[in-house]
Image (cartoon, rainbow, N blue to C red):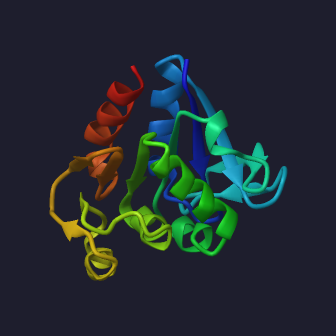
Amino acid sequence: MAKVAFLVDEMFEDSEFQVPYEAIKNAGHEAVIVGMAPGKKLTGKKGMKIKVESTSGDVRAEEFDAVVIPGGYSPDKVRTDQKMVGFTRQMHEAGKPVAAICHAGWVLAEADIVRGRTMTSYHSIKTDMTNAGAKWVDKEVVEDGNLITSRTPDDLPAFCDALTKRLA
């Protein structure tokens, strides 16, 4: 059984959290909602409510097997938390799966782990990704080493499939 951190803050894209979260749990793994404040209730763009289970200051890369960063407006907040950014970088450096969808590429860019890597994201942050050194491609899912990236909720089946295969 793998332990997977979901890095989330306010205004996450509901399906980009819910679908991978359920896929992880349905595969028999543990999913942990990691936020900035303990017990904080977070609301998705479409009204989904979730509660922070662990904080960015409490999680350590050696305790987790993968990290998932949902999109929406949440990644813009997550990338301002240096502990979440540091955790993402440590997970990457440990060779563990780092899965980001939609605008979550911002967190990967902030963690300085996209340079020289092929990835995708929501089209509006393509320039941010290329400026951070990534080779950006327009595909439903891109796996480059331990990075798994996708563009939009339409890509969730391929995104979840790639992630769960890595954890099998």
Q: Is residue 150 above or below residue 72?
A: above
In the image, farthest residue toward the front: 93
Q: Give the total of numbered labels.
A: 0
Looking at the image, can residue 119 be seen? Answer: no
Q: Is residue 114 above or below residue 47?
A: below
Locate residue 80 relative to residue 147 in the image: left or right.
right
In percent of width and height, residue 155 lies at 27, 48
In percent of width and height, residue 90 lies at 56, 52
Of the pair 154 and 133, the residue shown nearer to us: 133
* Quadrant in the picture for residue 167: top left
Q: At 22% from the left edge and 50% from the top edge, which residue is drawn? A: 142
Of the pair 14 and 31, the residue shown nearer to us: 31
Q: Is residue 1 above or below residue 23?
A: above
In percent of width and height, residue 53 lies at 76, 43
In percent of width and height, residue 77 lies at 61, 72
Q: At 61% from the left edge and 55% from the top edge, which residue is drawn? A: 87
Looking at the image, can residue 62 be seen? Answer: yes
Of the pair 21 and 54, the residue shown nearer to us: 54
In the image, farthest residue toward the left: 138
Q: At 39% from the left edge and 19% from the top edge, which residue is drawn? A: 168
In the image, farthest residue toward the right: 38
| Quadrant housing the N terminus | top right
Q: At 20% from the left edge and 68% from the top edge, which residue is drawn? A: 136
* Quadrant in the picture for residue 35: bottom right
